Amino acid sequence: MALPDFSTVNDALSSGGSLVRAAECHGVLCGILCTTGSTDMQGWVRHLFASRDESVDISANALKILHDVHQGTLAEINHETFDFSLLLPEQESALDDRMLALSDWCSGFSLGLSMGGLQDKMLDNDDVREFIQDVQYIAEACVKPESDSDENTEQSLVEIEEYLRMGVLLLNEELQPPAPAPTIH
C-alpha cells in the first residue's frame, strides 16, 4: 500500500484543525513503530489532533487518509525489500519547504521514539545510538546555509533523506527483530 502524498496528508491534518504537519505526523508514527513494533492508531490520531480547536470536526476522509498513512507505513517499515519512504514534499517543491519538512520529520521521529518508550537499555548498538543522535541534530540543523549553492544543498538533502530512510530501517530491525522462521523436523 503506497502512502498518500505529502500535500494530501497535510490537507487532511489542517482540515481537522491539527497543528501537526504531514512530515512530523509521519515521523511520530515511524518512531512509535520502531520502538513498539506496532501502534495504536487511535492514540496516534489523538496525539495529532490534541491541540486542535474542538469546534472543528475531523472528517471521515481525513481519518481515512491517516489510516492509509498508518497502514502504508506499517507495511513499508517491515517490508523485506527496503521500500520504506519518508513522507516529505515532492522533489519539485521549494528547497526551504523540503528542509523544513525534513526538520519536522526528525522532530516527530524523536518524539515518536519517546512516546513509544525508547530506553537507553534498548540502545546496545553504537550505530543505532549514533543514528538517534544524528536525527536530533538534523532536526535542529536543517536551516539553509547562505554560503552554499542550491545545487549543493539539494544534493545534501537527498543524501540526508537516504541516510534517514536506511537508519529507520536499521533501528526498526534492531529494536523489532524479525521472528525466527519455525523449524520443520
Image: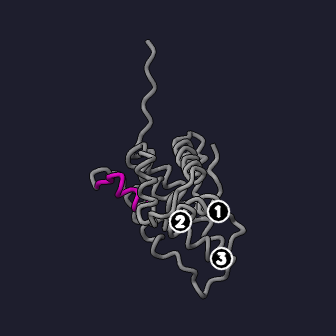
Kindly give the residue lying farthest to the right in the view shown: 92
Horizontal arrangement in the rendering, residue 149 relative to residue 36 (left or right): right
Give the image location of residue 34, x and y in percent.
43, 49
Horizontal arrangement in the rendering, residue 4 relative to residue 33 (left or right): right
Give the image location of residue 39, x and y in percent.
42, 45
Residue 17 in sight in this render:
yes
Residue 7, which numbered label? Answer: 1
Residue 140: quarter of image: bottom left
Q: Earlier in the sequence, mark 1 or mark 3?
A: 1
State the residue position of label 3: 152
Above-or-below relation of 67 to 93: above
Residue 21, which numbered label? Answer: 2
Tag 1 secondary structure: helix
Q: Do the residues labelled 2 and 3 touch (CB within 8 Å)?
A: no
The total number of labels drawn is: 3
* Amino acid tagged 2: Arg
